[in-house]
Image (cartoon, coloured by chain):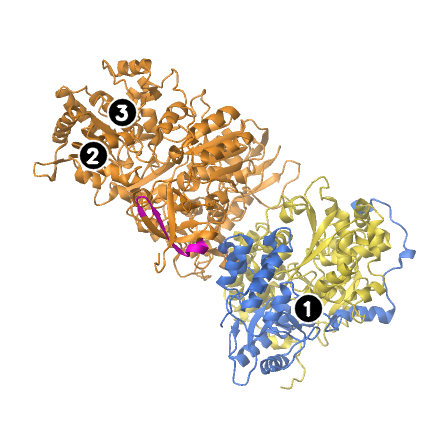
Chain colours: A yellow, B orange, C blue
Amino acid sequence: MSTLTPVLTDTWDAEQGWKLETYAARGGYSSLDVAFAMSPDDVITAVKDSGLRGRGGAGFPTGMKWSFIPQDNPKPKYLVVNADESEPGTCKDIPLMMGNPHVLVEGVIVSSYAIRANKAFIYIRGEVVHVIRRVQAAVAEAYAAGHLGKDIHGSGYDLDVVVHAGAGAYICGEETALLEGLEGRRGQPRLRPPFPAVAGLYASPTVINNVESIASVPAIVSNGAAWFASMGTEKSKGHGIFSLSGHVQRPGQYEAPLGITLRELLDLAGGVREGHQLKFWTPGGSSTPLLTAEHLDVPLDFEGVGGVGSMLGTRALQVFDETVCVVRAVLRWTEFYKHESCGKCTPCREGTWWLVQALTRLEHGQGSEDDLDQLLDQCDNILGRSFCALGDGATSPISSSIQHFRDEYLAHLSHGGCPFDPARSTAWAGQEVSA
Amino acid sequence: MTEKTVEKDEQSRGKAVEKTDLVTLTIDGVEVSVPKDTLVIRAAEQIGVQVPRFCDHPLLAPVGACRQCLVDIPDAGNGRGFPKPQASCTLPVAEGMVVNTQVTSPVADKAQQGVMELLLINHPLDCPVCDKGGECPLQNQAMSNGRGESRFSDERNRGVKRTFPKPINLSPMVLLDRERCIVCQRCTRFADEIAGDPFIALVERGAQQQIGIAEDAPFLSYFSGNVIQICPVGALTSEQYRFRSRPFDLVSTPGVAEHDACGSAIRIDHRRGKVVRRQAGDDPAVNEEWITDKDRFAFAYAQADDRLTYPQVRDEDGFLRPASWPEAFVVAARGLAAAKAAGGVGVLTGGRLTVEDAYAYSKFARVALGTNDIDFRSRPLSAEETAFLASHVVLTGPADPVNRAVTYDDLESAAKVVLVGLEPEDEAGAVFLRLRKSVLAGGTEVVAVAPYTTRGLEKLSARLVPTAPGDEAAALAGLAGELGADTVLLVGERLATVPGALSTAASVAAASGARLAWVPRRAGDRGAIEAGCLPNLLPGGRPVADAGARVDVATAWGTASLPEAEGRDADAIVAALVAGELGGLVVAGIDPDDTADPAATRAAIDAAGFVVSFELRRSEVTDVADVVFPVAPTSEKSGTFVNWEGRVRSWEAALHQPSSLPELRALSGIAEELARLGQGAPLGFRTVAEVRAEMGQLGPWDGERTAAAPAVAGPVARDAGAFALSTWKLMLDNGTMQDGDKYLKATARTPVALVTPDVYDAHGPTVTITGDRGSVTLPAEIADDLVEGVVWVPASSVGNGVLADLASPGSHVTITGAEGVHG
Amino acid sequence: MATNQLDDKTLTELREIAARYPEPRSGLLPMLHLVQSAQGRITPEGIEACAAILDISAAEVSGVATFYTMYKRHGVGDYHVGVCTNTLCAVMGGDEIFARLKDHLEIGNDEVAVKRQGDSRTVSLEHIECNAACDYAPVVMVNWEFMDNQTPESAVQMVESLRAGHEVSSTRGPRLCTWREAERVLAGFPDGRVDEGPTAGEASLAGLRIARERGWTAPDPEQVPAVEAGEGEA
């Protein structure tokens, strides 16, 4: 039985946890002096040794990403924090930045020091004004306290941080699209190579990391790589925030070692809502193939979830009970991908247009079983053919739902429409509602 | 783009990089070696495999957007394959790589068919009414690499296509049918990367993504038409050609553009004897695959209602009447014989001639008229320029190993290009594009000796050496220290009237090792020099003053002798006619308003006892001429232009109109009649082919070139309160060869007077500029870095043009506010 | 909606935004937020102003302004209400909330409700995509502040309070400011409301509360054996 390991969430119950005063009282910013006493390369080594893998979904080893920055390149280096949290189901970075922005700022300073960047950017999606306020203020407080700016803590190291608000585009979570947005352009992914580590922001060496990855760095530096690596599993080390949402008794954020199972998390969260059973869930947001009750004991680490044909992603555990029509759920996600497709490449732009129409017909009970195969073939023509992973993600819910719930699709055809009552799925279903 | 042009371009590209390392890979089981960094899609072309593509264009940066060119890579060269098909347009080759295209790989084939099916779900089925139908890469590749039937629109799954109200005007000329667009971004990439006019951009997102412009900011670019040509679907069309024809009804003939001295290759598409469209040709050494909008759209002039189609002679009653060719020859010969007796005949040929026609005029002047009074320059000129052309321009060319002529490719490899008296975007579009390519590649710095940073210079990131007109020689001398063997000096024809400028250019180039090229404005200028349409040069660059050269030519022509004295230049011919020293004039394609002194030129034509005019269309010159010969436009005769590089580009007639004869035929007819009258000798040719043969026989002069004239810098003093007049012709203006296309005209830049901020503040939004020939009133605009004491106006965009209405370039003008005038 | 012209202060601030970055064009997204704050939407004038300051074409600015969904080409209300209808919120009741609000406000998606007699403020309505608050589903955003765990009834009540001009607070954030004021914050000009609202909402604390209850913490660093260097490379 895994226990919870609050590290990043540990200060969230503090009064005014976003204030420097509160953070400092709990030892905040102490990792700076530890890091400055180390060489930048040693900081990179520590992060490598910790086994930290990117918390934004892809799980690329963070320390290795940093080591790709060519230090013989005379151009300035940049750190960019990907705070564009937009993957459906994902809701960890937003409360982190709202409740504990300083741990992110501290992480930015240590990470920038490691890659020898003197300028860092925090790219926050625009649709969260209060989060932006809190991060803006934290950066201002950090400047005032001498944690940012020139000669930080007398180390001779300089760092400036700019908080940048996005403007509504899921695709900007893709790191090269984010760079485009940060350069004042349409958020369309860039051709790789060159990779951002070589030519990223302003064609300079750039590291782009997720909020949670960067926020995990101060504790790694302070407590040691071994401390971090003592949590989690063989190849998926450390703590991570698991976000439970949907039909569970106590949805919310659960920070636990990687490798915890959904069964364990559901136990902590009081189980699926009263009187209902788990039907399907996403392990890491809507772009990760759906899983079902048969996967309750899969270790939620990169290998475990990968082993059952899905992806750990952002640990966005969206839980749906048996009242939910999987076709409706998948159609809505598909509409999302269509809305968020940047338009650059054909498979994603046109494919999502078609998928929505094909799924809509099926939801209305039109067509035949052959159409399911055609739908899968369309997915095959999009998956791996698109410019970036958005197109791939768009096919995940469709392919996985047909794999697990083919009969439910067919039921729509035999029923002549959706056999489910959407009212039964609402948060207030079964409750007395007074006007 | 057709498959053929892709291949052709690839050949030229291959040539450019032949010395680089080769990489060997296997494509569809065939081993092929290609230069390092070659993209897989081009490597496949080497073994004859055409991978379907839309966004890919060899002259644009790879983007990988359309995903049509997916191929299977079982081995990336490192023993590992890619798990998913890869876009071959963005993937460079690697040693040992294994590529399987649609030809051998079911995976690649299915991937391509899948993308094609997706491209077509929202593409309208309006091919029967689409301009692109029949020459459409989407249509063609849907046939070659697509499924037979769409599953989107079959009976069971009747999908809803995306529709837009149609079409929208991106500019007065370019229209966009959005539902046809496959957003490959070729057009926006062209506008941004090549032309530097990013006035079209991707707008909206996802399935609604489209090409757009900002409100009230149309796609006004001198190069806008290229986007129509490279559009792989029928999304972009021109007002000019839209719904006019079907590709399979067109006959295409290669040609060379006649609107500037760039020598750009074009393709003339015609139907039933009428040109309906012009496209860029593919000449990698010259214009690559781009042409200016003037080269593309300005051809209606040749089909105008006032086109002359038969000879005319002036009757005793004073009216012009139609005449047969033989009669016109006779009448012209008699008149010229009389004029010769009355002092002689001058020949003004203008800058529009083919080399073959220019040669005919040159020989006609010497052999039939016995004079060196011949000049092609129908614009301000100087004796200094005459000498410069003979000493530094004639005979230089890419084919000449001695004189190291500057080429387009040299512009790309030069560390620095200095522009003096030349505004490439307006005056030499292909030069501008090549310079921009070079600047963007990071290799070349452009330095401009000019009065202000024009939009074109801005796009070249040029460093301005702020210079008032007239001060160019001094500015050049000041730059001498930073020139070297890796520098190219491009001088424009405008320097002719700046005392000392051309000779200073020559001397600083000689001293520094910099390479020098003269870039004229008109297509026939350079060829006219080579053909000897100058008072000091015979054909093949032979100096008139050189007895050996004269003997050379006389021998070839079978005449006893040639006139020995250098002749009169155009200004002197005009003066001599006015003074009655010359009795007659042979004049070809000259607009008096283009000449140094329009009033004097008109007076000269009036004063001439006998005028033979060669013209395409009725003009004020034909109205007063005694004999008028119709001239064939370039599309209706074979010919050759020599571009600014000295590069020779020939073409054959696209259209065959019985009434269209090359001028050389008429000149030979007149010469024969003159010979019959005992004057001179026949020219000895009647056809273009015969002229080409004769020119080939004569060959270039291999003797001494004439020495450069010493620098004659004139003092530039300006009256207090006066402004130096800076002016040149915008690419699109009131030129008669742009007549007949209102859409093209509507894309021209608005004529304004450019002034310094002080002048604007003092005189307001509309100014009247007054010179010794009159006044013009124009809206004023501030040019931030315009040299103090200078005002710039477009040379031929309002009224009769600056030379007629205002003053000579570089001369002094005054500026007043024009209250109450709304320009 | 009448738009005021961009004043000198705004133009100065636009330049100020551009100056925050090593390359001015990076300022474009926040600059467009400021244009919205100043003019209530993206205006041709605002596009021109950004283009002039950044020395890029108006078409390029237009391309950016039409790519991101937060930029509005027509005016929105003083309070812009976004109902999440992405799958999880939709299933949890977002669809019903959105339908109820459309019906109640008598408008469609992305429209501004009529300002009735007596209303002091206007509201507009839009369905939005996942706003990263799934543990508070169904979620409604007002001027991009969280209104968590809504019901159709609570949503109707809220929009009525807003229209009446009453002060309404985010369920885990500050008192709501107007849409244009919020856009100013996004442009990087703080409004002093940062210290309003709690550190975290209840759902955010779900795991932490259990940990506290059960005495669970992350391991004590002192008790952890050192790893061998280089292991992380594996």
- Alpha carbon distance from label 3 to label 2: 16 Å
The residue located at (57%, 28%) in the rendering is B20
Q: Which residue is mark 3?
A: B362
Q: Do the residues marked 2 and 1 share a common chain?
A: no
Helix, strand or loop at mark 2: strand
Can residue C230 be seen from the camera position used here? yes
What residue type is disc 3 on?
A: Ser
Q: Is residue A258 above or below residue B629?
A: below
Chain letter, disc 1 residue: A
Image coords of residue B2 (percent x, y): 41, 40
Give neighbour class at mark 1: few <14, some 14-19, many 20+ (Cα, 10 Å). many
Q: Is residue A35 magenta?
A: no
Image coords of residue A138 (percent x, y): 74, 63
Helix, strand or loop at mark 3: helix
State which region is magenta: B760-774
Q: Which residue is mark 1?
A: A130
Quarter where residue B727 is shown: top left
The residue located at (25%, 18%) in the rendering is B563
Chain letter, disc 2 residue: B
- Alpha carbon distance from label 2 to label 1: 81 Å
**Which tag, 3 or 2, sits closer to the chain's start?**
3
| Image marks 2 and 1: residues in contact by CB distance under 8 Å | no
What residue type is disc 2 on?
A: Ser
Image coords of residue B447 (percent x, y): 51, 37
Image coords of residue A351 (percent x, y): 53, 56
Q: Is residue C171 left or right of residue B239?
A: right
What residue type is disc 1 on?
A: His
Q: Which mark is residue B613?
A: 2
